[in-house]
Image (cartoon, helix red, strand yellow):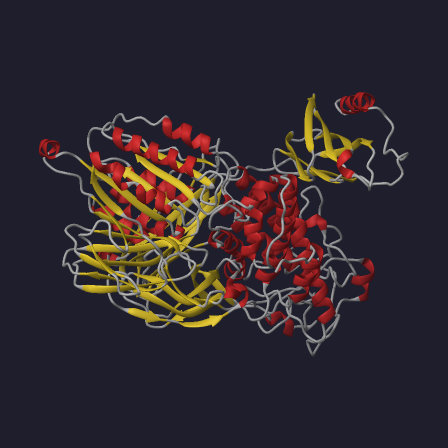
Amino acid sequence: MKSSVPVVALIALLVSRVQAFLSVGGSGNTHETITGHAVMAKIHEVCEAVAKSEGREFDPMGSSPEELLRACLGTATGEVSGAKFRTALNQIYMQNGFVDRDFMSSAPHHFNNEAFTEGRNLIIQGIAAIKANVRTDNLQSARETLGRVCHTLQDFYSHSNWVELGNKSPYVNLIRPDLNIENIADVAMPTCSDCASGTCPNQLLPAILSGKFLTSGYMGLFSPNKPKGKCSHGGKTDVSSTQNPRGGISKDERHSYNADLHNNAVNLASEATLELLEDIRGAIGNKDYLRLMGIARSAVLAFVIDTTGSMAKEIAEAKRVAFNIIDSKKGTQDEPSEYILVPFNDPVFGPLIRTTDPDEMKLEIAMLEAKGGGDLPEMCLSGLQLALTGAPSSSQIYVFTDDSPKDIYLENIITALIRSTKSTVSFFMTTYSRRKRRALKAGPNFQVYYDMALASGGQAIEVSKSSISQATDIIVDTSTSALVTILQRSRDPGRVESFSFQLDESVSNTTIYITGSSLTFNLRSPTGVSQSNTVATGPLGTIQSVGNLQRIQLNETEIGLWFIEMTTTRPYTIKVIGQSAITFIYDFVEEFKGPHPGYAVIDGRPSAGSPAKLLLTLTGEKGPEALEVHEVALVEVSGVKVSNGTVEKMAGGDFLVTVKDVPEGEFVILLKGKDKTFSSLFQRQTTTLMSQSKVTVKAIADSSMLPGEEFKLNFTVTTNGSSGTYTIHARSDKNITVTHPPTLSLESGGNAQGTVSLTPPADTVSGTDVTLTIEAEGPGGSDSNYAVLRLSVLSNVTDLTPPKCEIVDVQGTCYSSSCSSSNWELSVNITDNNGTGIESISIQQGSGNLTQKEVEDCVMGLYEASCCSTSVTLSAVDKVGNVGRCSYTMKSSADSRLISMSLPLWASLLLYGFLCYSFTL
């Protein structure tokens, strides 16, 4: 059934459902839902504008985010997975929990204690960082900052008296850098009357209301002290609310005594969030805005390639595979949305090359050549570090090399990044001939690559140089949209064992990978048909053997329970993949207390000795409502233990899972459920290995870095394990020197603090993303944990004024009876006066054409459109992201004598040019 709800009505419906300014995971609705409803409404609006500009229909088949995604991406053939979209949205939403946990007592983050100027500065700096991050294609950092900014912006309406002052629209000064906060109550000015019951509908003094003074409640988490006569925030956790004047003016939750105030605060917070999103959209353009929101095809093609002198064949094969994928998948949903290339040699590695243009990827990979090296080990892990931090999360990354890594010291950092990004890394390791190995006296040690492949759920394929072309089919298999893992297991040593996996109605292109040497196995279908490893082409599929890999492509996906029966004692790994829209994403979380308790994502391994909690988001073709969850378990990949969790259904397709008996070794998440559309049972599994730790590393970045200036970040290491000396490692993915204490001394049950310092070069581009990994390793290396932080480098912004966009002339006649036979034109004049200059001018809404001409410090624009498209919004953006707009709607008429303006086009352009010139005097 097609949805016919207009966007405005959709916003009103969603806003009316929001009932509380609480954190992630709270009962009822939360900051997450306020942000989420605004985000989805704006995505709908932008997708519709893009579709209209491209001349195609935009008609979501339902109300779920997945159906909106499908409509946004258009009608290209192929599966569409909502996983990447949901992941991007969660990167925004989950920051709400961080604000309430990490900045619980920070008044500016919540507009408490009348910290209006400081709170507004957080918003303005955050908006600048978001725009700069998008310009440098650092979308995850932009999303995370957006989530934090939304939280602070929304708290203004709940914690201040903006609503009580009778305001009916959001306070635009909060997101405009050229406007200041006005009429703040002086620190000595009393603002509230006493409320002994704590349930008074309005405690504000008449002088505050009549004078339109802005105030907010004081929050006392640890002390009841507050300035004399000031309002409190209120609530059980605010000890200042017991001091005269008692009570509080918070509108976080809806009660009988504040229902109208709360509802108005929710509505204004929602409208303010929409205005914020619209400002960001105007600065970055429609297509980049959709990429920011995760509206993109799910496939990413990422290569990390050894370019030393012996790698000519591998480089040629990587080029062939990349060209084949680009050419064969163009125009389908399997076409990669992004391309990553990282070359490495010795001693150099990089740079990271990242593009959305397939022709640019072809050009870059064609320029690679094999040269240099010679002393065998290469800088492979340094190149892989760049790919892991530069590629989107959950990417498939392919590494080509013929030697062991020289930078083995990065092994733990790489493992931390794999766990943090949930990316899958597959290694193509080529070996020398026996004669050359004898001459070198030893072959390469590939064990670290096997370990990393297992940790990420990838493959470690060891083949001869002459056979590399037979092994790269795995790249074609996995660089595709809607890729899901159905089963993954590892055994070392191997043993006789039978593995089952469930195939469902939605799965296609099922492929099985078994790695190991001299393996024997049997594949059995749900109907009992069998095929052994000795039958290359059989009733169930085709088996291709190359090096240590056996690739089984099923002839057809028979629905039901399949079995792989292994009859070998040699080490092996098994992985079953397919294509399906049904999948899930997850984060390990921890519960926190405070004024707004909830759940926040754990940055690192979950704590040992306590139950593991994780938030799951289920996604399918018709959204999570068409799916059921039957079982969620933590499964040892290399063992037999299966620990089932208790599942609690939450809003929006989310589930909170609690596992009490967590496996001691490394585990993955197994989910079993039912697709209600086809009454088909399904099974899905994560690929990234995880384990618990008795060590925790906590670090909070509360600001951006400045180019050329030292940035200091405090971190805390806590242990419930062994006492002793803990080794500290801290590294960034950029060429930035990092200093930190080499060790910290800890007692069991205690903690210790350290400081990391790093200085970005003075010429660092504003918006650059720096990934900092801090690792703490216990005595003897028996236990470790990490924190991964994304830090933004942001130059000081001095240009606070948006460009000026003025409509100079409108030409044309539009008739309501036949719009397709008539056109109209709009002339605009855009200047930035003494600002940083115009960066771009784009059509934000409208399906016409825009031509531009620069005249000294002014840009003349001419917009031409059919009378079937009568509305236009043009966005003019300066070099720091300030946005100016021109909007116009051409009125249609049945009267053929009505003309919008009578000046001929040459005369209007002459006038237009004169006006542009006059602004430069």
Q: Quadrant of the C terminus?
A: top right
The quarter of the picture where residue 345 lies is: top left
Q: Is residue 393 left or right of residue 871?
A: left
Name of the residue lying farthest toward the front: 539
Q: Is residue 524 above or below residue 548?
A: below
- Give the image location of residue 299, x and y in percent: 43, 45
Please give the name of the residue rendered at 73% of the width and 73% of the height, measured from the top-left corner.
194
Q: Is residue 866 above or below residue 150?
A: above
Would residue 438 appear left or right of 504 to someone viewing this image?
A: left
Q: Residue 509: x percent and y percent?
A: 37, 51
- For the residue pair 702 and 596, the one nearer the viewer reads as 596
Which quarter of the figure has residue 679? bottom left
**On screen, 114 above or below 445?**
below
Q: Decide if residue 787 is in sight here.
A: no
Between 132 and 888, the one lying in front of the other is 888
- How many labels, in total? 0
Instruction: State whether residue 706 appears in this view.
Output: yes
- Left or right, 607 with reference to 915: left
The residue that appears at 27% across and 57% down in the rendered structure is: 778
Percent of width and height locating residue 498: 23, 65
Left or right placement of residue 313 versus residue 571 in this view: right
Residue 780, x across and y down, in percent: 22, 56
Q: Quadrant of the N terminus?
A: bottom right
Q: Quadrant of residue 226?
A: bottom right
Would you place residue 581 above or below residue 305 in this image? below
